[in-house]
Amino acid sequence: MIIIGITGSIGCGKTYLANIIKKMGFVVYNPDKWVRDFYKKSEFLNIIKQNFPTTFENGVFNKRSLRNLVFNNKDQLEKLEQIVHPFLKKKIKTVINKLSRNTDVIFFDAALLFEKNWDIYCDYIIVADIDEETQKQRVMKRDNITAEDFYKIIKVQISQAQKRDWADFIINTGEPENINKIQIMQFMDEIL
């Protein structure tokens, strides 16, 4: 089985590429989505509440409050990552073991692929890329945040330039979808 990671800094288009790849009939998993799903589980939320009690208002979890806390304090971010990482590692290993017997190729769509060292599970890495101004505008519009918040987020990620250096393949998501699809098909032809 071949495992291909799709990554790129926030707003660079990795999920857009993942959707094209899904339309092509490939299996794509999103560890970032798994993390969002963790916040719906009482076991996980109890751990969050123990470690970040101020992120709960009248017993209800406030994700924006947690985001503000961790992106303004590196120690708090590391603390959160130490909680999330074991949950994700277990989930990734379960998925790989389950699919390794009957699937030829799977993709992982993960923003923090390099930051979390999940690239060790991947045979190849595709990096979604776009110029920084377009990236910033996409994130500000999509997440309804300020430019200041955007820069706080990318500050905790490995730089897009470094991700390009580590990539096996780079796709400019500013190109039309049909061009990106052709690029993905060429990449798949090369590795298969």
Image: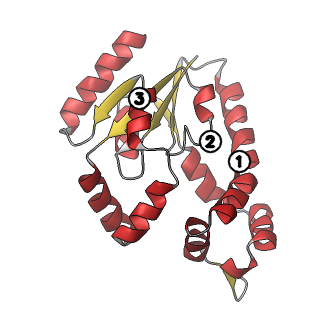
Q: Return the residue found at the far bottom.
A: 58
SS under mark 1: helix
What amino acid type is highlighted by mark number 1?
His
Placement of the N terminus among the 4 image quadrants:
top right
The numbered disc on residue 154 is none
Placement of the C terminus among the 4 image quadrants:
top left
Q: Position of residue 152 (x, y in %)?
A: 46, 63
Q: Is residue 181 above or below residue 103?
A: below
Residue appearing at x 76%, y 46% in the figure: 86
Is the residue marked by circle 3 packed among few (<14), some (14-19), or many (20+) residues within 10 Å? few
Q: Position of residue 165 (x, y in %)?
A: 41, 29
Q: Is residue 69 left or right of residue 87?
A: left
Which quadrant of the view contains residue 48? bottom right
The numbered disc on residue 116 is 2
Is the residue marked by circle 2 packed among few (<14), some (14-19), or many (20+) residues within 10 Å? some
Which quadrant of the view contains residue 14? top left
Q: Is residue 190 above or below residue 17?
A: above
Q: Nearer the viewer, mark 1 or mark 3?
A: 3
Residue appearing at x 47%, y 60% in the figure: 153
Residue 39 seen in this snapshot:
no
Residue appearing at x 36%, y 72% in the figure: 146
SS under mark 2: loop
What amino acid type is highlighted by mark number 2?
Lys
Q: State how far apart marks 1 and 2 are (Cα).
A: 8 Å
Q: State how far apart marks 3 and 2 are (Cα).
A: 17 Å
Q: Is residue 96 left or right of residue 166?
A: right
Q: Position of residue 51 (x, y in %)?
A: 78, 69
Where does label 1 land, which residue? 85
What amino acid type is highlighted by mark number 3?
Asp
Q: State how far apart marks 1 and 3 are (Cα).
A: 25 Å
